[in-house]
Amino acid sequence: MTLPFDPPHLLIVVGDFYAHIAEELVAGATEAIKAVNGTYDVIKVPGAFEIPAVIAHADRATHRPAGRHYDGYVALGCVIRGETSHYDYVCGESARALMELSVEGLPIGYGILTVENEAQALVRAKRDQKNKGKDAVVACLTMLSVKRRLNMGGV
């Protein structure tokens, strides 16, 4: 991917509930960021539900003198359906909160797997398969590019 702007500095926020899956997602994401000479920080949180709050806090911190500036955000994690409705709440609310942040203008790549079982998660997490960590970085960079073009008066 060729970027029409300087290499970005991104924040990866990863729900670490399924650590082995999270590690694969982060590995794919960091490879994609390095491929465009970007830099990144990683913050681990307990699960998908906590990801939007950390992104919101990080964005607010960028407006403070000592705060770290991020050009965009990558949300990674995994929610596997269980026997209760907990899955529906976690998936729905984390996606809704991330969409609200995105609509407010934050470039966010969504890489939270919502799957029925661990086998599905592994296929979507492993770097030699459908790694969604990489895809989330590509989405973030695309949204960052669109935002910058629109802010400069272009389409």
Image: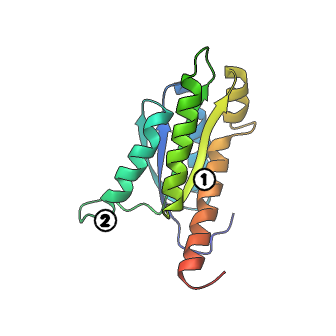
For marks 2 and 1, give the CA distance.
Answer: 23 Å
State whether residue 22 appears in this view.
no
Instruction: Give the number of the mark in front: 2 or 1.
Output: 2
Q: Label 2 crowding class (10 Å Cα cut-off): few <14, some 14-19, many 20+?
A: few
Marks counted in the figure total 2
In percent of width and height, residue 81 lies at 63, 22
Residue under the point 56% across and 71% down? 147
* Label 2: element kind: loop
Residue 32 visible within the image: yes
Colouring convention used in this rendered image of the protein:
rainbow
The residue closer to the viewer here, 62 or 102, is 102
Question: The residue under label 2 is which amino acid type?
Answer: His
Q: Which mark is residue 16?
A: none
Q: Which residue is mark 2?
A: 63
In the picture of the structure, the residue carrying the numbered disc 1 is 137
| Image coords of residue 149 (percent x, y) | 59, 78
* 7, 83: nearer the viewer: 83
Q: Residue at x 47, y 63 (%)?
A: 71
x, y percent for residue 100: 51, 54
> Residue 88: x, y in percent?
59, 29
- Front in this rendered view, residue 98 or 15: 98
In the picture as drawn, the residue positioned furthest to the top comes out as 83
Most extreme residue toward the bottom is 153
In the rendered image of this protein, does residue 122 appear above or below residue 128? above
Q: Residues within 10 Å of mark 1 (few under 14, many from 20)?
A: many
Tags 2 and 1 in contact by the CB under 8 Å rule?
Answer: no
The answer to which of marks 2 and 1 sits earlier in the sequence is 2
Type of the residue with mark 1: Val
